[in-house]
Image (cartoon, helix red, strand yellow):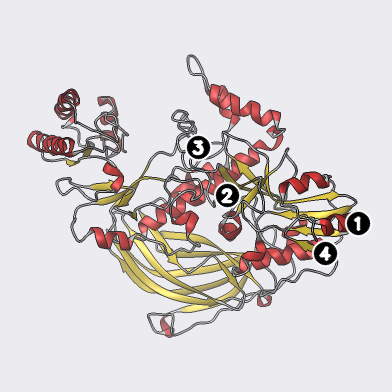
Amino acid sequence: MRFHSHCPPEAAFEAADELGMLMQPELSHWDPKGAFETEESFAYYQRELTQILRMLANHPSFVMLTLGNELWTQETGLARMHQLLALARKMDDTRLYAIASNGFYGTTGCDAESDFYTSQRFYGMPLRGTSAAEKKEEGIQGHINHRYPDSCMNYDPTMEKLRKKYEKPVFGFEVGQFEVLPDFGELGDFHGISSPANLELIQKKAAVHGLLEEWDRYVEATGELALIGYREEVEAAMRTREMSGLSLLGLQDFPGQGTALVGMMNSHLRPKPYSFARPERFQAFFRSQLVLAEFPGYTYESTERLQVRVKVANFGKQEICAPVRYELRGALPRNETASRWVTVEESPLCFARRQDTSSMEVRCVKGEAEEMVCVTGELPQVTCPVGELTDAGEFTVLLSADRPMRLSLHVQVGAAENTYPIWVYPPVEPACPDAVYETEVFDSKTRRVLAEGGIVYLTPPATAEAMPSSIKTQFTTDFWSVGTFPAQEGGMGQLIDEKHPLFANFPTEFHTNWQWWPMATQRAIILPEYKKSIVTQMDSYAYMRPMTQLLECRCGGGRLLLSSMGLQNLQQYPEARALQNAIYQYLISEQFRPEQEMEAEVLAGLVWENLTN
C-alpha cells in the first residue's frame, strides 16, 4: 500500500502488521520544480525522515519509502536527495529507499543510488498504458488509445534498455486512473461537515438535460470500460518479464483535485452498486497467479485461424504443475448446431509438443437460455516456478462462422485461469444498397432525396473539418479528470443501444469493448440538444455536452442515419466492415423507422454543407 506524499499514523502500521499488508509511506513532499533546494525545506524533511524511522522502523509492514511524489529538482536538490537516502540507511538499512515516486517524471532515467525505480516511463519509453494528454490534438497518451488492440503488448523494449544500467526492482507508477461517471446514490452517505457540492452540481446538470432516468446506464457503461482499461494495464505489466510489478494510484473515487472519480469503490471506500465494481471481477485479472493468452487481435474473419501463445505469470507462494486446458465458447440461437459455425484443427506447426499428447473436441453444452458451443483442447503439463513468467505452449483454432459472433476464450493451468472476448465475422465487402443515398456532405442532393421521402446515410469523414461541431474521441474514459488535465477532449466512451435491430448483425454490449476500438477512436458530433442515439458518446461531468456517433431520424419527409465514425475509411478492419454491412442491411429493412425528427438546417450545421452538387 503506497501512501501518496504522506506517512499515515502508527495505527495504520499496527493494522498492517496484523493483516500482512506491506507499506510504502512517503515524505509529505510534492514539488515537481525545485524539491529540497531551499534550506527550510531540506531541514524540515530531514527532521520528518528521522522521526518516521524512529517511530515506525520496528513495524514489519514498513518495507519501502520514497522522499515524495513526482519530485523534480536541480543539482543542489538532487545532492540533498542522496544525502537523505544516506541518512535513512544509516538509521535503518533494512528498508528499501528511493529518491522519489515518479521522480523527474522518468525523463532522467533510474537513479543509481535508489533501491527501486517506480515511474510512468524510462526516458521516453513507457512503463504503463495510459498517461495524461499533453496536447488536445494528440489525446491521452499510451498504447491503449493509440495501438490497435491485441493481447500481446508488454514493456520488454523499455526494460531491455533500462536493464543495461539498472538491475534493481522496477514497477509501474500510478497505473490506471480511468474515470467513471458519478453514482448519485452516494450523495446520501455524506454527513456532518462533508458536503458533496461538486457531485450535486453534476446531478443538477444531468437533471437539466433529462438524463437522470437513464443515468445508471451511463455510470455502468463508463465503469465497464474503465474495468477493461485496468485489465489491459495490469496484463501488459504481467506480460513484461523484467518488471517487478505495478502500483495503482487508487481504486476509490477522489472527490478532490478536479473531482477524480476513478474508482471501482466510491469515496467512502465501498464498492459501487454495479456489476463492474464487484470485487471478484477485478480480482479475476489482478492476482498473483494469472494465465496470459497472447493473440494478435480480438477480431477475426471466419476464414482465419486464432493462434494463441499461453504464458503463466506465477507470483504466488507455490509453483504450478498442470496441463493447459482451453475452451472457446459462444452463444447460438436455439435449435442451431455446432457444426454450422466453428470447427477445430490441430496443427503440428502450432504445438510445441507432439500431437498424441494433446486432445481437442467440439461439443455442445445446454445453457439456461441458449445452446453453447465449445471447442476444447489440452496441452501437456507445464511447470510454472514461483516468480517467473513461463511459456506454457501454443494452440490454433480454425474459425468458421456464417454470422457475426462474440466468443469467449477460456484458458486454465491448475488454479490459474483467464477469459478473453473474441469476435468473428464472415467475410463481407459492404456495398451501399441502391435504395440508399450515401453521402459525406449534407448537399443539395441530400435535401432532394429527403424531400422525396428517400433514405440517406450521412457519413462524413471523421475530421474536424468535416464535422465542425465535434470532438476527437478515444477508446478509454477520461484520464483522472479534465479539471486536472484539461488537454483532453472529455469523451467517456460509448453508451450503445445493444438491443437496437441494427446490432442483429453486429454483436455488442451496451458499452465500448475491443471490437469498437477503430470506431471509438474517431470523432463524436456535438448536438444542439440531447437526442436518442444508437451510439451515444458520453461526456465528462465537466462538460456534459450532448454527443452522438450513430443517430437515426426523420428529416424533410425522408429517413436519415448519421454516423461520425468515418467507417468508409476504416475498411481495413473486419469489425468496421461488419458494422458497415450491418448498417446497410438495417437501412433497407422494415425496421428502419426512426421516430424522432431533426430539421435539415440543424443537420446542415453539424456536417459540412456543399450546395454545389
Which x, y percent locates residue 120? 34, 48
Give how far across and how far down residue 314 sits, in percent: 32, 59
Q: Which residue is mark 3?
A: 482
Tell me whether the residue at label 3 lies in contact with that at label 2, contact meaning CB atoms closer than 8 angstroms. no
Q: Is residue 417 visible?
A: yes
Looking at the image, tell me whether mark 3 or mark 2 is earlier in sequence order.
2
Q: Quadrant of residue 185?
A: top right
- Give the CA separation, mark 4 to mark 3: 40 Å
Q: Residue type at mark 3? A: Val
Instruction: Residue 436: give its label.
Output: 4
In the picture, measured across the screen, residue 233 lies left or right of residue 426, that is left
* Residue identified by numbered label 1: 453
Marks 3/2: CA–CA distance? 14 Å
Q: Residues within 10 Å of mark 2 (few under 14, many from 20)?
A: many
User: Crowding near pointer 3: few (<14 within 10 Å), some, many (20+)?
Assistant: many
Amino acid on which the number 2 mark rests in the picture:
Lys
SS at mark 3 in the image:
loop
Q: Is residue 285 visible?
A: no
Q: CA distance from mark 3 to mark 1?
A: 43 Å
Residue shown at the point (16%, 37%) measured from the top left: 81
Q: CA distance from mark 1 to mark 4?
A: 11 Å
> Between tags 3 and 2, which lies in front?
2
Q: Position of residue 226 (x, y in %)?
A: 51, 46
Which numbered tag is attached to residue 472? 2
Tell me the CA gap for discs 1 and 2: 33 Å
Mark 3 or mark 1: which comes first in sequence? Answer: 1
Amino acid type of disc 4? Answer: Val
Q: Amino acid at mark 1?
A: Gly
Residue at 7% x, 36% y is 90
Quadrant location, the N terminus: top left
Mark toward the start of the polypeptide (1 vs 2): 1
| Left or right, residue 521 beside residue 411 | right
